[in-house]
Image: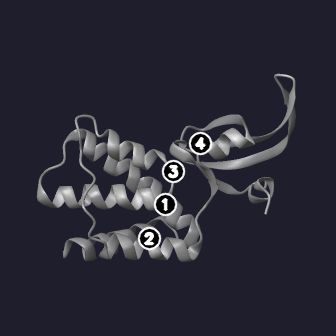
């Protein structure tokens, strides 16, 4: 399947660390003397329109929303997985970089790491802010993939976290 076919007009996609976007259009434009395929996106969180060369957008993490099966697997991994937490260095760069990759697995790893840390001790302000940001992004993707309401998505994530922490 070509890259262009993955990004139909009107579809919701993940645009790396920028979050979710709606595809407004795909076309060809001349940029710096070359014809390139560009994608027009409306980034939902920042309420901003952007036009990006398709190749560059894919490098920055543009991808379709995950599948229903992958979303279900991620909830199970969040509930049952017991990986070594990603360490929080001075500015949280390791966790932030993993989240910025824009992949569902990365979101689960960061979310799980912060939840496990929270179980051991109180989170600092930076950790708390990142936890909220990651949870929001994760909930949006899982909800979109499973076609759940915001409340139902939150219930599913809360249940997975409760299983993880034994609450």
Question: Do tag 1 and tag 2 residues touch (Cβ < 8 Å)?
Answer: yes
Q: Position of residue 46 (x, y in %)?
A: 55, 37
- What label does residue 74 carry, if any? 2
The residue under the point 51% across, 51% down is: 102
Alpha-carbon span between mark 1 and mark 2: 8 Å
Q: Which one is earlier in the sequence, the residue at label 2 or at label 3?
A: 2
- What label does residue 60 carry, if any? 4
**Residue highlighted by disc 1:** 104
The answer to which image quadrant residue 31 occupies is: top right
The residue under the point 33% across, 44% down is: 94
- Secondary structure of the residue carrying numbered label 4: loop
Mark toward the viewer: 4 or 2: 4
- Secondary structure of the residue carrying numbered label 1: helix
Residue 119 located left or right of residue 78: left
Question: Do tag 4 and tag 2 residues touch (Cβ < 8 Å)?
Answer: no
Residue 51 visible in image: yes
* Above or below: residue 141 compared with residue 61: below
**Residue highlighted by disc 3:** 102
Alpha-carbon span between mark 1 and mark 3: 7 Å
- What label does residue 93 carry, if any? none
Question: Do tag 2 and tag 3 residues touch (Cβ < 8 Å)?
Answer: no
């Amino acid at each position: 399947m070509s890259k262009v076919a993955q990004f139909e007009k009107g579809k919701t996609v993940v645009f790396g660390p920028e979050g979710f976007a709606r595809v407004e259009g795909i076309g060809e434009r001349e940029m710096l003397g070359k014809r390139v395929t560009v994608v027009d996106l409306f980034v939902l969180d920042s309420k901003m329109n952007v036009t990006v060369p398709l190749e560059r957008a894919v490098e920055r993490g543009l991808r379709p929303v995950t599948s229903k099966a992958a979303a279900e697997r991620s909830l199970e991994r969040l509930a049952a997985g017991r990986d070594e937490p990603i360490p929080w260095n001075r500015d949280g760069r390791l966790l932030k970089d993993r989240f910025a990759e824009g992949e569902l697995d990365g979101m689960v790893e960061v979310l799980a790491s912060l939840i496990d840390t929270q179980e051991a001790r109180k989170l600092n302000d930076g950790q708390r802010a990142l936890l909220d940001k990651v949870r929001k992004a994760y909930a949006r993707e899982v909800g979109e993939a499973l076609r759940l309401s915001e409340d139902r998505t939150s219930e599913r994530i809360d249940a997975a976290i409760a299983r993880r922490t034994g609450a």
